[in-house]
Amino acid sequence: MPYIPVTCPSGSHEFFYSISTPTESSAEKIQEGLPTILFIHSGWYSQQIYESQFTDPHIRQFNLIVIDNLGNGSTRGKIGDQRYTPKEVAKDLRCVLDALGLPPAHIFGLSLGAIAALELAIAYPECVLSLTLCSPVSLTEPEHIAAGRMQVYKCWEAAFAASLDPKDPETKQKQQDYVEEALLGVTQLLFNNVKTRLIKALLVHQVLQGVEIWSGTEENLKQSYDACVRCFIEREAIPTESFAKIKCPVSIIHCTEDIGYTMEHKEELANKLTEAGVKVTLHTVPGPHFALLEGYENINPILVETVLGTDGGPKPPTTLPKPDYRRGKMKTPWTEALQEHGYLPDDPAGSNDMEDAEIASWFERPRVLIREERTVVTEVHG
């Protein structure tokens, strides 16, 4: 899982990416002669959110690539004060794809990543073979969802505030409470508060990574706001005439238990695309906003069908790659890391419900706090 330095419209950054092929979970390059799928993630979670897609042999018959967006995951660089919405994300991703020398690709976008996928197909139609948009957010952010995102950020900010004294024995519990409150908002919107082993493992992984990249300095906290709030609320609706620039088929997936973004939002998008002459298929599947984790058995076939049904580009072999686990799953770039947090790849979807399980403290190892004098203080909270 390497880095690639890229100078793009937002600046010079080192983008972290992962490639999986039919024969390698973490490959250095794609396998020639196979279709390539680019996965674009949303806010709060980085590339690991695609565990259930990269582990599926039906999807691993293709080349798969995912890039941590600027401000997220392990990508090195700062968003800063510049405007950074899905439109700017798409411009950066195009630069990374060019730097990697990748061919035209199929795109799978999740939530806000679906809007970035649309922007990519509008600005660079020659690079996009198909679009699969899973739980696309509305064309503009609803006020009540924007308020919820801000509330989650305020909880995160409070967990690492300058007013917290690292010498105070109650600080650890205060931090824990603030983080748990932030996670409650995240899991409610994305998973309807369901916590399976995989969802819980991803929560732990993301919080630990978030502590590393989104705390410790005011600049890091601002990065959290930029990536998880501002990127959503500052986006503008794509002009209707722009949809006509899309030259590929589009599959839209609505998850019926999505509490934030309704079927009407997906129908509005589908209607605009259809009016622009784009071939659109609208699917409905059960599950919450991020149903792709435990509802992959409904979502993955839509992606495969979209890729295989697209004219042009290479075709995969007729045989699927061999699974690594008993239940037919393959190892991904993140499987081992998620196993450390309780994920069991041999479990069936939705098994081992963790809803009532107590999540261990996030602060059992050294953490950083923002201090009023602007210095970084490291404390071990035992």
Image: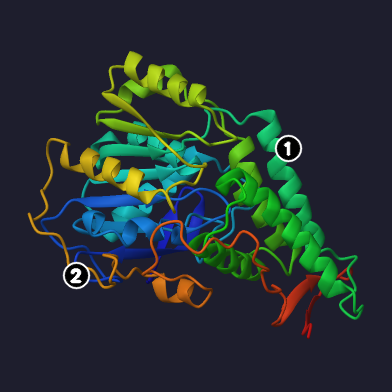
Residue 151 appears in which quarter of the rendering? top right
Please identify the quarter of the rendering in which residue 274 is found: top left
- Name the disc covering residue 23, or none: 2
Q: Which mark is residue 366?
A: none
Q: Quadrant of residue 236?
A: top right
Q: How far apart, in angstroms, are the residues tagged by discs 2 and 1? A: 44 Å
> In the rendered view, does 176 fall on the left or right side of 72?
right
Pick whichever of labels 2 and 1 is earlier in the sequence.
Answer: 2
- Where's the N terminus, which quadrant? bottom left
Secondary structure beneath dot 1 equals: helix
Where does residue 54 sit, x and y in percent of width and height? 32, 60
Residue 55 x, y percent position in the rendering = 32, 62
Tag 2: amino acid: Thr
* Mark 2 and mark 1 residues within 8 Å of each other at the beta carbon: no
Q: Residue at x 11, y 48 (%)?
A: 314
Q: Position of residue 193 (x, y in %)?
A: 62, 50
Q: Indicate the quadrant containing the C terminus: top left, top right, bottom left or bottom right.
A: bottom right
Determine the secondary structure under disc 2.
loop
Residue 332 seen from this side: yes
**Type of colouring:** rainbow
Q: Is residue 60 left or right of residue 241?
A: left
Q: Residue at x 47, y 71 (%)?
A: 338
Q: Position of residue 122 (x, y in %)?
A: 35, 31
Q: Nearer the viewer, residue 141 or 69?
A: 141
Amino acid type, label 1 = Ala
Residue beneath disc 1: 147
Q: Residues within 10 Å of mark 2 (few under 14, many from 20)?
A: some
